[in-house]
Image (spheres, rainbow, N blue to C red):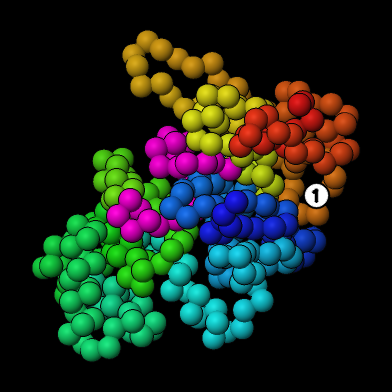
Amino acid sequence: MSIPLLETKGLKKYFKTKKGYLHAVDDINIKINEGQTLGVVGESGCGKSTLGRTILRLIEPTEGEVNFEGENIFKYNGDRMKNMRKKMQIIFQDPYASLNPRMTVGQIIAEPLYVSKITKTKQETNNRVHELMEKVGLAERYENVYPHELDGGRRQRIGIARAISVNPKFIVCDEPVSALDVSIQAQILNLMMDLQEEQNFTYLFITHDLSVVKHISDEIVVMYLGKCVEKAPSRELYKNPKHPYTQALLSAIPIPKLGQKRAKNIIKGEVLSPINPTSGCRFALRCPHFSNECAKIDPPIRKINENHFVFCNLY
């Protein structure tokens, strides 16, 4: 059996607060094979973005491992981690805030080339910048303009060009289309899928938009308050959701047909505090199938079929 490109084992990230430790990411175990896309979904504040940043070591973990090509990158020193940056990149959520307003489009795309010392001469750098601009659909005339002069879609194309400039193997896509109009979202998603097919990129695609994640992902992980509650292939999850939280999320997706409505599972109850959470299922207080066992014991992992897993006492 081949080694996955990326695997996390018992990954945790806690933040110290005045009231205790906030469990942003709590014991996450995922695997992503090369050339695949793993979608991560959940409501705002569930730990999706923290997971992505911890995997890249933009945030140092509290506990656990991230194995990239079979090696735990948390053991790497500064120089080795700097070289690893060529293999692992990120596309940020906000194209308005993630680009340096003092730099032109060409300078922004060229910066990783200088830092990583991929190109040797200025001419080689310029040629690579033009190649990347063409690849992401940016006209060459935009090379000397500043980010504020462009719309959101073009700004996000700059962010994508910057991320792929060093030829990475793995890219964290942190809600890359959530700040864009729907028509622009489709263009950016199609661009990312074309680039993946062309260069065999591996994506961790973070989003709260269930329609978007279905379109791009091979497998999907559903997170709730720092925990993974369900993991399954994309089609399987949409066809046969098992966890009550997943069922409620999917019931909220509108049906694009006049006169047809989906029965909604409305989530009631209070959200458990992520600071020093007690044992038991973190969704228990909002779950329609609540039992005393749910509040006392951490839900075990249940295997529904070969690739479908759920953390729930119902199964």
Q: Magenta stretch containing residue 205, yes or no? A: yes
Callout 1 crowding tier (Cα within 10 Å): few <14, some 14–19, many ≥20: some
Q: Magenta stretch containing residue 245, yes or no? A: no
Mark 1, secondary structure of its residue: loop
Give the residue pinned by disc 1: 277
User: To which quarter of the image does residue 148 belong?
Assistant: bottom left
Amino acid beneath label 1? Pro
Q: Is residue 90 visible?
A: no
Q: Position of residue 69 (x, y in %)?
A: 56, 65
Q: 50 and 78: which one is in front?
A: 78
Q: Is residue 160 visible?
A: yes
User: To which quarter of the image does residue 140 belong?
Assistant: bottom left
Q: Position of residue 310 (x, y in %)?
A: 69, 35
Judged left or right of residue 130, residue 270 is right
Residue 76 against residue 211 in the figure, above or below: below
Q: Position of residue 243 (x, y in %)?
A: 67, 30
Residue at 37% across, 49% down: 177
Q: 21 and 129: which one is in front?
A: 129
User: To which quarter of the image does residue 64 belong?
Assistant: bottom right
Q: Quadrant of the C terminus?
A: top right
User: Which residue lies most toward the top here?
Assistant: 259
Residue 241 against residue 4 in the figure, above or below: above
Residue at 64% across, 58% down: 8
Q: Position of residue 236 (x, y in %)?
A: 54, 29
Residues in magenta, as a range: 196-221
Residue at 35% across, 16% down: 257
